[in-house]
Image (cartoon, rainbow, N blue to C red):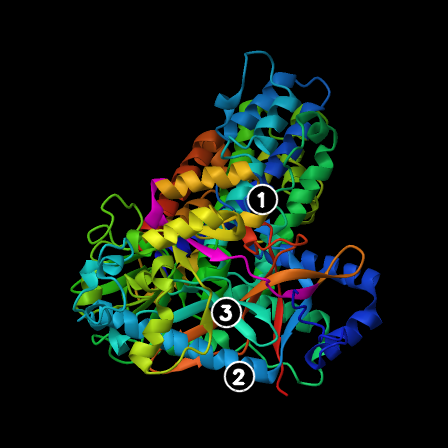
């Protein structure tokens, strides 16, 4: 039985949704549709867009916005908050460990080859202590819900999780258009996120930094799909938005090219993949990147956020072991559970997956964005057979999970309020201390029954409320 | 300020100004081409020639309005077309989103896809409407910049870009006149020449301002004076150079050093000042205009050098 977050088991409205319910009833469905059009016009004018690669058509697309907020009660959030912080802490502890003594591997809790032979593992990082021992400064944890008290982690994002601009813009547009919903002050604000992010970044300034750290946001450029978010965050933090061509390395420090000559840079919040950071250290054929950047980083001249190699912690093959990490490093039981996962790289796992593929969701270990996955129950026999062949050809490249009864949230449909599956991504900030803004990004599948919430595949976003009481 | 940012702001303003200037050029072409007894081909060809777009012509027949509208308004392959300018202005602005206000960005963002899917026939039919639309978009953008943009170096770079482009287009408009017909008489009255000269004033929205300064008499020397040397008319070359000098001085102060571009701007200004009272026509209008264009190009290169674009 699918859990509909707006209703209790008897079909009544849950207390935390009372305000939303009242508002829906008062405004009426035609009224809501009218307001939705207004909201979309605002989004388009502001230029909040994302790009979809390789599909042609409109190069800058609008992300569909759903008007009805998703609501968490104070108690629900308390538990999420603890679970998210716990996980972010364990993931950073794991990263420190695998780039130093590898205790968790020596203890036999995680197979060594899974780490050391992983493409996301960066041998260049071995033995280096990043400032504050933080590797992943922004940890985005994708969470799904399967019941009133069941939250499960779908995956972790330790490199450069995106989407936080939607969290901020969705709230901004809701407060602008429906101030009456926020009058009672029951919804916890999220608009201090940029300030918290800047504090976090300044806390991890490199040893060479003297005085107030100069922070920049490094973007691949205006053609990148998340460029809007890059410029948005730089704007709200009041820091320079730079491209690789704006930076160079000299005397062990990083400089930005300005009209008044070179100016030093202390902390780089980079939204560029490891591979393209520095052609001297990583991909030599990369035209992006700042030659010498990695050397400056290792010698303490600059801090990169996140650290190169942080991706080993959010690898889908490593995901299975996060509960172990929490026990091993923190001596605690995981507050948020994992979803049971079979690894096709193991013999038992492969056998089970091939036998039950029709009931499972299978994914590529290195895939992202909802591409290249198979949803067993929604696929034809031919599709399943073809996918099974792909798994057999490279078993360790795949994992599989049971199809879960994901919860649904109220969503505005043509004729009224409909139920759609959703997930949730909060953003945990890790500097000298941990910070977590009460909220996150709710992504919602806009097609009935669909489990794919990715924006690149037609998913939408909605505002997420955490109530104070 | 990042050098790339300065570069992007400079070009954003230039491209937008260029879009408007090209629209004005089309106005002038249209006015001249409908004059009685006009040698049809020359008028439209000269418009292409001053923008350096003659090579986009296909075939060798007479140049028609449709040819020119296709090339200068719509052609996405022609980097000088209005369509290209709007797209490029936006691309430059998008690269420096954080340096623009919300309103400036919205003004840019609303223009760039306007001409997508528009055919040449449609464009020719509604040309005056399109031209007005382009001018309005440029005005809205300048307005948002005027009232909203912080007066830091970025504003100076954007203003310089706009003024430079405007100066160049006034010079080019004067050159169109040169290509069509050299001034033959001192006093122009009633004939085609008169209309050609006043077309230049019309295209620059300067006909009434001219009357206020010089009364109702149109002589080539006075029109050239008005468009090159007058320091009160905002589309005159001297006015634009004045504006560039002001912002270049601000930049020099902010960066603590004068550079070659300050000297060139002063040189250009001195040249214009010395050209009063018909001197440019005596020396050859075409040569004088070409010399000024050369100096403005040098100025652009020197700005890029001085500020590490």
Q: Name the residue: 37% across, 42% down.
A: A392
| Residue toward you, A141 or B55 | A141
Q: CA distance from mark 1 to mark 3?
A: 75 Å
Q: Give the number of the disc on residue A78.
A: 2
Image vertical order of residue B109 relative to residue B194, above or below? below
Inspect the magenta stretch and tell me whether residue A254 lies in it. Answer: no
* Label 3 and label 2 in one chain: yes
The residue mark sitting in front, 1 or 3, is 3
Q: CA distance from mark 2 to mark 1?
A: 73 Å
Q: Give the number of the disc on residue A152.
A: 3
Say whether residue A153 is left or right of residue B141: left
Mark 1, residue position: B226
Characterize the local packing of mark 3: few (<14), some (14-19) or many (20 or more) Cα atoms within 10 angstroms. some
Q: Looking at the image, is mark 3 or mark 2 earlier in the sequence?
A: 2
Image vertical order of residue B9 relative to residue A304, above or below? above
- Badge 3 sits on which subunit? A
Q: CA distance from mark 3 to mark 2?
A: 15 Å
Q: Name the residue: 42% across, 78% down.
A: A85
Circle 1/circle 3 CB separation < 8 Å: no
State the SS at label 1: helix
């Amino acid at each position: 039985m699918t859990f509909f977050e707006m209703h209790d088991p008897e079909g009544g409205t849950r207390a935390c949704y009372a305000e939303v319910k009242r508002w829906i009833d008062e405004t009426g469905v035609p009224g809501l549709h009218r307001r939705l059009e207004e909201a979309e016009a605002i989004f388009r004018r502001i230029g909040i867009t994302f790009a979809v690669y390789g599909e042609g058509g409109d190069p800058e697309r609008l992300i569909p916005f759903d008007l009805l907020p998703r609501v968490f009660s104070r108690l629900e959030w308390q538990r999420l908050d603890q679970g998210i912080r716990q996980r972010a802490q364990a993931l950073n502890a794991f990263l420190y460990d695998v780039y130093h003594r590898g205790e968790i591997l020596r203890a036999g809790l995680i197979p060594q080859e899974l780490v050391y032979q992983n493409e996301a593992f960066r041998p260049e990082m071995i033995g280096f202590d990043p400032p504050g021992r933080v590797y992943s400064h922004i940890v985005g944890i994708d969470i799904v819900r399967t019941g009133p008290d069941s939250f499960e982690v779908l995956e972790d994002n330790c490199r450069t999780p995106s989407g936080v601009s939607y969290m901020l813009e969705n709230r901004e547009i809701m407060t602008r258009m429906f101030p009456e919903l926020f009058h009672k002050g029951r919804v916890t604000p999220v608009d201090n996120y940029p300030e918290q992010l800047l504090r976090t970044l300044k806390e991890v300034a490199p040893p060479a930094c003297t005085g107030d750290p100069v922070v920049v946001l490094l973007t691949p450029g205006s053609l990148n799909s998340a460029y809007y978010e890059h410029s948005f965050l730089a704007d709200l933090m009041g820091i320079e938005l730079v491209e690789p061509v704006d930076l160079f390395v000299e005397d062990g420090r990083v400089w930005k090219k300005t009209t008044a000559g070179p100016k030093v840079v202390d902390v780089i919040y980079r939204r560029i993949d490891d591979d393209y950071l520095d052609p001297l250290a990583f991909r030599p054929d990369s035209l992006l990147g700042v030659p010498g950047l990695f050397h400056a980083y290792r010698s303490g001249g600059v801090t990169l956020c996140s650290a190169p190699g942080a991706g080993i912690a959010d690898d889908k093959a490593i995901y299975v072991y996060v509960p172990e990490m929490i026990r091993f490093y923190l001596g605690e039981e995981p507050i948020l559970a994992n979803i049971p996962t079979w690894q096709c790289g193991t013999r038992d796992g492969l056998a089970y997956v091939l036998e039950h593929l029709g009931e499972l969701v299978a994914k590529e270990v290195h895939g992202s964005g909802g591409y290249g996955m198979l949803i067993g129950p929604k696929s034809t026999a031919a599709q399943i057979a073809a996918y099974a062949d792909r798994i057999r050809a490279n078993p360790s490249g795949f994992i599989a999970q049971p199809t879960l009864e994901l919860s649904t949230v109220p969503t505005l449909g043509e004729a009224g309020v409909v139920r759609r599956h959703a997930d949730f991504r909060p953003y945990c900030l890790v500097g000298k201390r941990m910070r977590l803004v009460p909220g996150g990004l709710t992504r919602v599948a806009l097609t009935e029954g669909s489990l794919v919430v990715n924006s690149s595949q037609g998913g939408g976003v909605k505002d997420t409320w955490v109530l104070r009481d | 300020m990042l050098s790339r940012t300065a570069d992007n702001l400079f070009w954003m303003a230039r491209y937008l100004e260029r879009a408007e200037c090209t629209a004005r050029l089309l106005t002038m072409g249209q006015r001249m081409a409908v004059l009685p007894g006009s040698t049809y081909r020359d008028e439209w060809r000269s418009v292409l020639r001053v923008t350096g777009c003659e090579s986009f012509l296909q075939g060798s027949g007479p140049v028609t309005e449709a040819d020119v509208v296709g090339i200068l308004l719509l052609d996405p392959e022609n980097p000088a077309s209005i369509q290209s300018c709007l797209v490029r202005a936006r691309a430059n602005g998008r690269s420096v989103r954080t340096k623009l206000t919300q309103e400036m960005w919205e003004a840019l963002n609303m223009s760039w896809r306007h001409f997508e899917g528009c055919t040449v026939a449609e464009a020719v039919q509604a040309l005056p409407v399109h031209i007005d639309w382009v001018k309005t978009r440029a005005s809205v953008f300048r307005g948002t910049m005027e009232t909203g943009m912080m007066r830091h170096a970025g504003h100076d770079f954007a203003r310089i870009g706009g003024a430079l482009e405007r100066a160049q287009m006034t010079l080019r408009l004067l050159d169109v006149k040169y290509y069509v017909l050299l001034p033959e008489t001192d006093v122009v009255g009633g004939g085609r020449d008169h209309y050609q000269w006043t077309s230049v004033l019309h295209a620059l929205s300067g006909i009434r301002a001219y009357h206020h300064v010089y009364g109702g008499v149109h002589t080539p020397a006075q029109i050239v004076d008005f468009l090159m040397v007058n320091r009160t008319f905002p589309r005159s070359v001297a006015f634009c150079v004045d504006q560039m000098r002001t912002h270049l001085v601000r930049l020099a102060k902010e960066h603590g050093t004068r550079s070659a571009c300050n000297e060139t701007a002063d040189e250009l200004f001195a040249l214009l000042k010395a050209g009063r009272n018909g001197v440019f026509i005596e020396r050859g209008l075409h040569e004088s205009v070409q010399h000024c264009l050369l100096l403005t190009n040098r100025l652009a290169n020197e700005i890029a050098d001085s500020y590490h674009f």
